[in-house]
Image: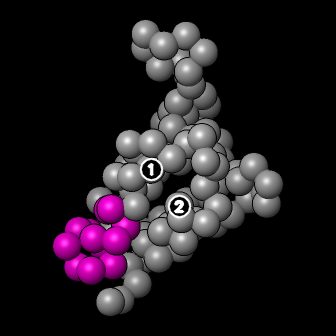
């Protein structure tokens, strides 16, 4: 099992620890499993965990793992520089959206 480098690191704003740079599938998986807010462990979080594990096992590309990780991070509002917008049809719910995200 080899660590898979992302083409571009993801900078997160973690609630209790501050900023965190995630540059590999292993770092993303570690962040998802140990530092992710409990309230944000939904479908996108589960998809990101699976994608990062699959990338480490050679079943998915680094691009797929990063994309899934970014979706989970944006949903949780952790992406540095992302703006938060309402999810259609659910008042009070927010999800992060960032221009130029792969």
**Pointer 1 local density, CA inside 10 Å: few below 14, some 14–19, many at least 20:** many
Residue 95 shows in the view: yes
Residue shown at the point (56%, 21%) measured from the top left: 93
Dot 2 alpha-carbon crowd within 10 angstroms: few under 14, some 14 to 19, many 20 or more: many
If the image is split into quadrants, where does the N terminus sit? bottom left
Determine whether 19 is above or below 3 in the image: above
- Give yes or no for contact between labels 1 and 2 (Cβ–Cβ under 8 Å): yes
The residue labelled by disc 2 is 32
Label 1 vs label 2: CA separation? 7 Å
Task: Verify whether residue 51 appears in magenta.
Answer: yes
Which element type, helix, strand or loop, lies under badge 2? helix
Displayed quadrant of residue 76: top right
**Residue at horizontal 39%, vertical 52%?**
46
Residue 97 falls inside the magenta stretch: no
**Horizontal and vertical percent position of residue 9:** 53, 65
Residue 45: give x, y in percent of width and height.
44, 50
In the picture, residue 71 is in which quadrant?
top left
Q: Which residues are magenta?
A: 50-61
Residue 77 vertical placement versus 49 (above, below): above
Say if residue 9 shows up in the picture.
no
Q: Residue at x 34, y 71 (%)?
A: 53
Residue 32 placed where, x, y %?
A: 53, 61
Q: How is the structure coloured here? A: one colour
The residue that disc 1 covers is 45
The percent coordinates of residue 6 (x first, y second) are 42, 70
């Amino acid at each position: 099992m080899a660590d898979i480098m992302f083409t571009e690191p993801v900078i997160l704003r973690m609630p209790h620890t501050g900023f965190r740079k995630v540059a590999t599938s292993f770092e993303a998986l570690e962040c998802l499993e140990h530092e992710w807010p409990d309230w944000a462990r939904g479908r996108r979080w589960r998809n990101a965990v699976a994608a990062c594990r699959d990338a480490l096992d050679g079943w998915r590309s680094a691009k797929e793992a990063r994309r899934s990780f970014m979706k989970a991070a944006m949903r949780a509002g952790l992406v540095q520089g992302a703006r938060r917008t309402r999810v259609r049809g659910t008042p009070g719910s927010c999800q992060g959206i960032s221009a130029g995200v792969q």
